[in-house]
């Protein structure tokens, strides 16, 4: 089963989250960042739910340690769940590679859907080889990938397709339509002036 780590200094919240998520995986709990680091050093987790303001080691330090210290949980998605609504806290958490930030109180349905989505993404990544940042970030559609044939311009350059006449049209559309005379725009030859009648001789 999937491994889920809940890190929060409030035992009531840890118990509530554990009950809500127990059907999704094996749940471990930590009351502060120091306890969390000990658990992260011994077990690979699929999702971490993290509070920010805790004693001993807070969530900001824990995020920084996980992101910068080699270990089996370095790429584990971390979802911050906190009562701190300040923009400064949000920026600090996201800069330290938090995946998402939720504000307490969190509806149980929202929490469950979030963890289910994270576990599904992890399962999808595990079913195919990982390349580069694909271990953390989903790859875009094939047309957006570098080197994909779908993103290459038509042969002959980007304007090649536009310069070709549509099917059924004639090359050299400036030719006159059938039944007209070539050079119809040339001026008609001028007629010679008519001779005036000669007067009878006397």
Image (spheres, rainbow, N blue to C red):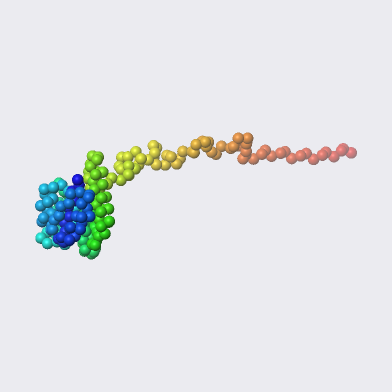
Residue drawn at (13%, 47%), measured in percent from left and top?
43
Q: Quadrant of the C terminus?
A: top right
> Foreground residue, 78 or 198?
78
- Does any portion of residue 164 appear in the rendered image? yes
- The quadrant holding residue 175 is top right
- Does any portion of residue 92 appear in the rendered image? no
Q: Is residue 44 left or right of residue 196?
A: left
Residue drawn at (18%, 49%), measured in percent from left and top?
26
Tell me: residue 147, above or below residue 116: above
Residue extending furthest right? Answer: 202
> Foreground residue, 126 or 183?
126
Q: Position of residue 133 (x, y in %)?
A: 23, 46
Q: Quadrant of the N terminus?
A: top left
Question: How many callouts does the rendering have?
Answer: 0
Q: Is residue 103 left or right of residue 37?
A: right
Q: Position of residue 118 (x, y in %)?
A: 24, 50
Q: Position of residue 178 (x, y in %)?
A: 60, 35
> Foreground residue, 72 or 14?
14
> Foreground residue, 79 or 20?
20
Residue drawn at (63%, 35%), measured in percent from left and top?
179
Q: Is residue 154 left or right of residue 101?
A: right
């Amino acid at each position: 089963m999937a491994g889920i780590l809940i890190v929060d200094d409030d035992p009531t919240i840890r118990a509530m989250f554990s009950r809500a998520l127990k059907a999704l995986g094996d749940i471990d709990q930590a009351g502060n960042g120091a306890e969390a680091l000990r658990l992260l050093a011994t077990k690979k987790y699929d999702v971490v739910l993290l509070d920010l303001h805790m004693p001993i080691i807070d969530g900001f330090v824990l995020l920084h340690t996980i992101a910068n210290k080699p270990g089996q949980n370095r790429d584990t998605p971390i979802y911050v769940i906190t009562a701190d609504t300040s923009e400064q806290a949000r920026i600090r958490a996201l800069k330290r590679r938090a995946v998402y930030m939720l504000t307490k109180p969190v509806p149980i349905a929202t929490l469950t859907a979030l963890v289910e989505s994270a576990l599904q993404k992890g399962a999808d990544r595990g079913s195919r080889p990982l390349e580069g940042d694909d271990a953390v970030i989903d790859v875009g559609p094939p047309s957006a990938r570098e080197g994909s044939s779908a993103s290459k311009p038509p042969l002959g350059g980007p304007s090649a397709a536009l310069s070709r006449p549509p099917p059924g049209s004639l090359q050299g559309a400036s030719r006159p339509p059938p039944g007209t005379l070539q050079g119809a725009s040339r001026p008609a030859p001028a007629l010679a002036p008519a001779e005036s009648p000669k007067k009878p001789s006397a």
